[in-house]
Image (cartoon, grey):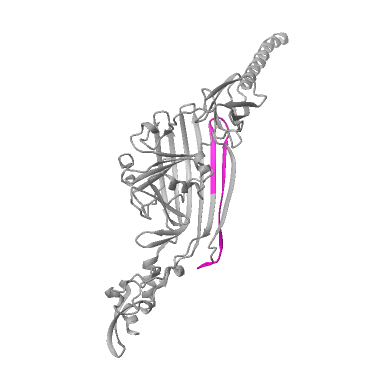
Amino acid sequence: MKNKKQGNFLPKAGIIAFTFLFFNLAEAQQQLIELSGSIKNTGTHKGLDSVKVQIENTQDTALTDQLGNFKIRTRVTIPFRVVIQKDGFSSQTVEILSPSNKITIGLNPQNTIIDDVVISASRVPEKILRSPIAIEKIDIKTIRESPAASFYETLENVKGLQLLTSSLTLKIPNSRGFNSPNNFRFMQLVDGVDVQSATLGVPLGNAIGPTELDIQSMEVTPGAASALYGMNAINGLASLQTKDPFTSEGISVYFRGGVNHVDNVNHKISSLGESAIRFAKVFNKNFAVKVNASYFSGTDWISNNLNDQNSGSSVTANPNFSLANNPAEDLWNKYGDERNNRVAVKVDYNGKPTTFNVSRTGYLEKDLVSPDVKNIKFDAGLYYRFGDQWRTSYVYRYGLLDGTFQRGNKIRLQNATVQNHKVELTGRELTFRAYVSIENTGDSYNLKPLADNLDLTNLSNTKWKNIF
């Protein structure tokens, strides 16, 4: 009996050992392989940045850094082929027989017509030269070479587009001649999400947009795009695209600083600066995370124009009365001294009873608005790929903003916050996207009603009139 049991046991042990060995061999064949190397320009022998390196027939891709170096991970078994591509250079396909050594590849410059694929033109990929409307594309190379203070300000270099600066934290694009500090006719998207403020009805510049470390490209339509995107895009559209964590992995940090008010007029010399960090990590070939954070602070310019808006011939300006001592003065950057806070007063002037228009004292803008501004931005995303065709993601964005917004009146945005939640499923022929915006104006206020209420809290117009 013992021999019989042992005879039955040995084949079973052999089967178990064979099965264990089979799975180990299968797992070994699927082990993670890291391939590294550099891409150079054969003409200058210098490294090429932003070169796309892709494992053939997979979504395993990487981009070279500023020195032309790259690292790419894959679970494809050796041998496999690598495709190297960059606009303006001939593409190459290299067969990899062993990943043990670094590879060096040279690309030959090629004179070609660039016809990048865009999405903003008609919501489906198409060539720029075939688009039915004008499209201006600002790629990562143009952004890096721009002398502008920030990547967002490179929009001002686009033909047909003007960037109006209302505050250090608020820069509003305009096109088609509608020069307005609150251009609600110009639409702005970040990865397909409309970032317009629901309360103000206008985009808040780049208050909750991407940081300079995460921007990939900007596509601008400086003309009517309302047929595709609704009435908000009647003047144009700016679509900002961020970097893909699967192709742009790693951690990046930057700091930019400067000074203003160097003339010590209205405010002493002060500093301003912005710092940001980006982190992207691919945990396996199908799952990736991305996190961005930035902080900007500074001292805005001081609006303190004390010129009188009244002209000498205006009835409300008390004709023949010295403007230097005009009791009905209405200063440009003073609130509460406007016409609606004006009364008629009879007094003896040069021995004669005379009626004068007299305005309330009001309050200077520099006393109603703090010049300190800040902008805090944060976003985080989870990304997952299903094979080579489908991808799903969840992205959360948060922005906190202080600044001065110009409309009919000036509005001080104080601790105003905007949040975005977005879920997206994309395939080769299908895109499903849903998002929600949550806004809180915080401690924001309108300067004109604030000054009026301060006046009336002190004394009513009637009582104020009687003190003369």
Q: Is residue 29 above or below residue 132?
A: above
How far from the left and from the top, in percent, is residue 411? 40, 61
Could you tell me which residue is drawn at 32 percent across and 80 percent down?
Answer: 321
Could you tell me which residue is drawn at 48 percent across and 62 percent down?
Answer: 301
Q: Is residue 10 left or right of residue 441?
A: right
Seen from the viewer's position, the closer of residues 462 and 19 is 462
Q: Is residue 157 above or below residue 344?
A: above
Main SS of residues in magenta? strand
How far from the left and from the top, in percent, is residue 98? 65, 21
Q: Is residue 32 visible?
A: no
Q: Is residue 245 left or right of residue 360?
A: right
Q: Is residue 2 visible?
A: yes
Could you tell me which residue is drawn at 51 percent across and 22 percent down?
Answer: 57
Q: Is residue 216 left or right of residue 172?
A: right
Residue 91 forms part of the magenta stretch: no
Seen from the viewer's position, the closer of residues 3 and 219 is 219
Q: Is residue 177 left or right of residue 256?
A: left
Could you tell me which residue is drawn at 54 percent across and 40 percent down?
Answer: 290
Seen from the viewer's position, the closer of residues 426 and 403 is 403
Query: Which span is picked out in magenta?
Result: 264-293
Q: How many marks?
A: 0
Q: Dividing the image into 4 quarters, which one contains the N terminus? A: top right
How far from the left and from the top, in percent, is residue 308? 37, 71
Q: Give the farthest residue toward the bottom.
A: 351
Q: Is residue 413 above or below residue 433?
A: below
Q: Dividing the image into 4 quarters, which one contains the C terminus? A: bottom left
Residue 276 forms part of the magenta stretch: yes
Seen from the viewer's position, the closer of residues 139 and 36 is 139
Name the image quarter holding residue 248. top right
Q: Is residue 168 above or below residue 48?
A: below
How far from the left and from the top, in percent, is residue 334? 40, 70
